[in-house]
Image (spheres, rainbow, N blue to C red):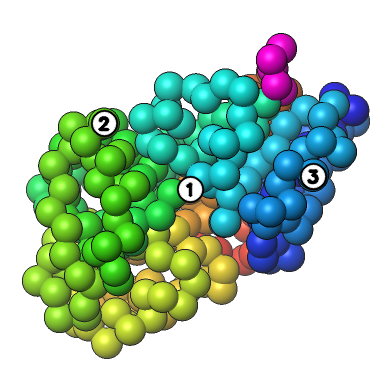
Amino acid sequence: MANRAAVLGRPIAHSLSPVLHRAAYAELELDWTYDAIDCGVDELDGVLAARSDWAGFSATMPLKHALLDVAATVRPIAAAVGSANTLLPGPEGWIADNTDVAGIVAALSEHSLAPSSVTVLGAGGTAQAMLAALLALGVDGCTVLVRDPARAQALLATAERLRVAVSLARLDDAASALGADLVASTLPPGAADPLARRVWDRRQTVFDVVYYPWPTALAGAAARGGARVVSGALMLLHQAAVQVALMTGKEAPVRPMRLALAAAAPRCGV
């Protein structure tokens, strides 16, 4: 059905994507539905086969790399990043796209940041999108801190494709790179909590892509230190707005979507 869409992932019960997409449909007066479907990598083919006539899918962990494998066509931004968060129907099959990059750019642009040094935490699909977003904002080099450098090969491949200079190091709460102007955490919920022990200062900005529960331990510690804190809910909002436009062909109503998100999660930071 061309008026149905959903977000796929695991875990998925916490997702606020339905709040955003449904708010957009209501504002646009579209008789569409948007669901949240529990789906891991092994179930992805079956889930898509059973819904081949749907208007599109959003995707979160652990599917951002798997979308590239099930797509008949991969759009250039998703190919460059090496991960996708969106599937759209196409004449040859599913089209994989990446709206995370646009979401990150819009979230950081709301704060008019011009960092001279940047450190990214993590090496997964969102970290890959972060490199592309930073490049779009004029940052062509950064430090990446990871828990296991041996698992950062996909991220390093992204950096090579984008021609972004990356200095890779092991994540530790004493790492000097955590003193960067912008510290962007793409780690899963709870993984950045040990960094709350660190002293943050007012010249720094901390962007945590985790948005629930908010504030995270990292965001709370950074705020107490006087740092500017950017919530992952802003990224969620703006990447969803791009998805709404791609799936419906209509300009996304960002303000009503923002209000709906704030109402559903009053402390989410939007």
Picture disc at residue 268: none
Of all residues, the one furthest to the top in this rendering is 91
Disc 3 packing (10 Å; few <14; some 14–19; many ≥20): some
Task: Identify the mark nearer the N-term, 2 or 1.
Answer: 2
Of all residues, the one furthest to the bottom in this rendering is 197
The answer to whether mark 3 and mark 2 are in CB contact below 8 A is no
Task: Identify the mark nearer the N-term, 1 or 3.
Answer: 3
Question: Which residue sits at x=36%, y=51%?
Answer: 127
- For badge 2, the amino acid type reads Arg
> Percent position (x, y) of residue 209?
44, 58
Distance from disc 3 to disc 2, alpha carbons, whole Å, reads 31 Å
Taken as a whole, is the magenta stretch helix, strand or loop?
strand
- For badge 3, the amino acid type reads Val
Q: In the rendered structure, does residue 92 fall within the stretch colored magenta?
A: yes
> Percent position (x, y) of residue 37?
78, 53
Bounds of the magenta span?
A: 89-93
Question: Which residue sits at x=49%, y=50%?
Answer: 234
What residue is shown with label 3?
A: 47
